[in-house]
Image (spheres, coloured by chain):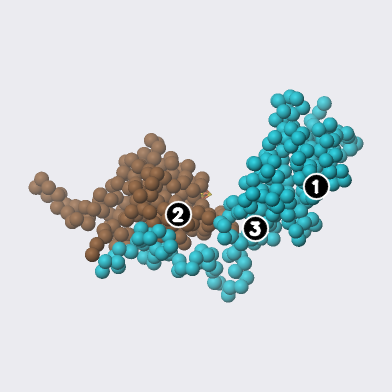
Chain colours: A cyan, B brown
Amino acid sequence: MGDPRVRPPGAPPGGGAASPAPWLEAILAAAPGQVERLEPCYGIESLRVAPTALLAVADSIREAGFTMCLDVGGVDYLPRQPRFEVVYHFLALQGDGRPEQPRRLQLRVPVPEEAPEVPSIAHLWPSANWAEREVYDLFGIRFTGHPDLRRILMPDDWEGHPLRKDYPLRGPRDRAAATLPQGEQFDFLQARRPQPLAHARGGWRPDPGAGGSEAEGRDGHDGAGA
Amino acid sequence: MEVTNEPFLVTRLDQFARWAQKSSLWPLTFGLACCAIEMMNMVSPRYDAARFGAEVFRASPRQADLLIVSGRLSHKMVPVIRQIYAQMPEPKWVVAMGACASSGGIFDNYAIVQGVDQVIPVDVYVPGCPPTPDAVLHAVLRLQEEIVQGDPQAGVIRRHG
Ligand code: SF4
């Protein structure tokens, strides 16, 4: 009766579903005291799990039939403490025995700023591999036990984690603006390469490291044979 | 070129070469973002870039002489575009298509290069977000004018030795 996403007036948080379903009971029992049931979000059951209990809970989630890890995301709640949260979304295609109603589960893991570390679940859901790399790249949250924790979106030599709330919007350009004399522009590409920069028309010279003789500039031949 | 009453043309070699070059531009298949959709449209029957001899998009930079930078260029893409540009045989030209390729556009942020002319030389800039296919076609026509006029910097004819 009614829209399951709307909590009826007077109903307890938890969408009116006062007692958890059996599959949820099993997950809650996997790490007693370290799993907290939150108010369902758009009809999706939501749990808050301490990082130390994540692996035990993840095992029981997998056993409860959640075969898909849809996404792993990060949130920066600056200035709240603990500052970060890693949010997982799982999907059980079988639902409650009815394939047309898949079951979903949300997991929220609070992460402190001083030790931003969460155990990796990539061994249970391979799809979490790249998703965790993305969270690491953009938020700087390390996933312990991850098979290959490298940046995935930003260049490998990038400094900082751009989706943190205290990261300057223009990145290194903003940081340098504070130190440069007024009116002087920080040349970002210049800073990342040891060599004077290409400018349109005439001034451009090939980057010696870029590709040998073929990396010739526009007027590269003219001077070479003379 | 000059047409005389005789059954032949009188011209200079460099003018002839420029005419040949402008009449057969081979753009590179290189779509970076939303602008690329309009770039694809340029060769559709509706706009028909073939009328100006610039419809043969090549998948290899070694067969292309026109690089249409169609979209925002991220810092991670910089080494790629520099290598692709270096792989294109001379003479070659670059069109910065759209606000993003010309100046960074709306993406004044940490991830996007504020104009591809910081990385490779650009011949024609096309305003718009995205520019219409007509505008890109217009850029190709402007480029052809430039090639015919033979800007000494544009590298139309190379002297070897
Ligand atoms: S100029 Fe506009 S359409 Fe083109 S890449 Fe940028 S945002 Fe997309």
Q: Quadrant of residue B92?
A: bottom left
- Near-viewer residue (A80 or A90): A90
Specify the subunit that label 2 lies on: B
Query: Residue at 67% across / 44% down in the picture?
Result: A122
Specify the subunit that label 1 lies on: A
Mark 2: which amino acid? Answer: Ile
Marks 1 & 2 on one chain: no
Q: Could you give the CA–CA distance between mark 3 and mark 1, rounded to whole angstroms?
A: 26 Å
The numbered dot on residue B81 is 2
**Quadrant of the rendering where the N terminus of chain A is positioned:** top right
Mark 1: which amino acid? Answer: Ala
**Residue B142 seen:** no
Where is A71 relative to A80, above or below?
Answer: above
**Quadrant of the rendering where the C terminus of chain A is positioned:** bottom left
User: Of tags 3 and 1, which is closer to the observer?
Assistant: 1
Residue B7: image x %, image y %? 10, 45
In this rendering, position of residue A185 left or right of residue B4: right
Report crowding for label 2: few under 14, some 14 to 19, many 20 or more residues within 10 A (C-alpha).
Answer: some
Query: Residue at 45% across / 69% down in the picture?
Result: A196
Residue marked by disc 1:
A53
Q: Could you give the CA–CA distance between mark 1 and mark 2, rounded to whole angstroms?
A: 46 Å
Residue A56: image x %, image y %? 79, 43
Q: Residue furthest bottom?
A: A181
Secondary structure of the residue carrying tag 1 is helix
